[in-house]
Amino acid sequence: MVSLVPGMTVEIIVSDPWDFGTAHGAGPFKACLTCAASDPNRAMKGTAAVFKLEETRMFRDVKCEYFVAQTRHEGSDLERLSVGEPVNCNLICIPVERALSDNPLDLAWWRGGVSLLASVRKA
């Protein structure tokens, strides 16, 4: 059961890639949860979420506004955000049309692009 509520505000602190940090700093960047559900991209159980940055960033000629977040470590889950714990995540930048689609968490189409390593915490 997913307990993350759309509209929840989070802070994202980016640790990699270094050139994102050079261009924009490490953060924290405010973002809003738009949706969360069981992660359709992984065999292991867990939650995935879509976050929308409060301020859009350009990076490597890509408009970075929406990101699919997945936990980086087995045994961790994005549900921990709801109780105030930070979570280490992979953030995959997705285009706005994917973010607003019927299945924004599906990354089967993704073959590379902007991805970040970050710590996400409830704001």
Image: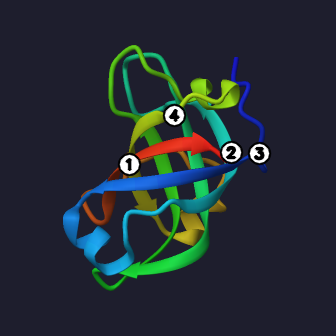
Q: Nearer the viewer, residue 43 or 22?
A: 22
Residue 110 seen: no
Q: Which of marks 1 and 3 is in front?
A: 1
* Few, some or many residues within 10 Å of mark 2 (<14, 14–19, 20+): many
Mark 1 Cα-neighbour bin, 10 Å: few <14, some 14–19, many ≥20: many
Report whether 25 appears left or right of 82: left
Q: Distance between the residues labelled 1 and 2?
A: 18 Å
Q: Residues within 10 Å of mark 3 (few under 14, many from 20)?
A: some
Mark sitting earlier along the chain (1/3): 3
Q: Residue 6 carries which label?
A: 3
Give the quarter of the image for residue 79: top right
**Label 3: element kind:** loop
Q: Distance between the residues labelled 4 and 2?
A: 18 Å
Q: Is residue 38 left or right of residue 35?
A: left
Q: Which amino acid does label 4 sit on?
A: Pro
The residue to which callout 4 is attached is: 86
Q: Position of residue 23 (x, y in %)?
A: 31, 80
Residue 77 higher or lower than 11, as above or below:
above
Residue 35 is marked as: 2
Three-letter code, disc 3: Pro
**Disc number placed over residue 118 in the picture, else none:** 1
* Mark 3 vs mark 4, CA separation in Å: 17 Å
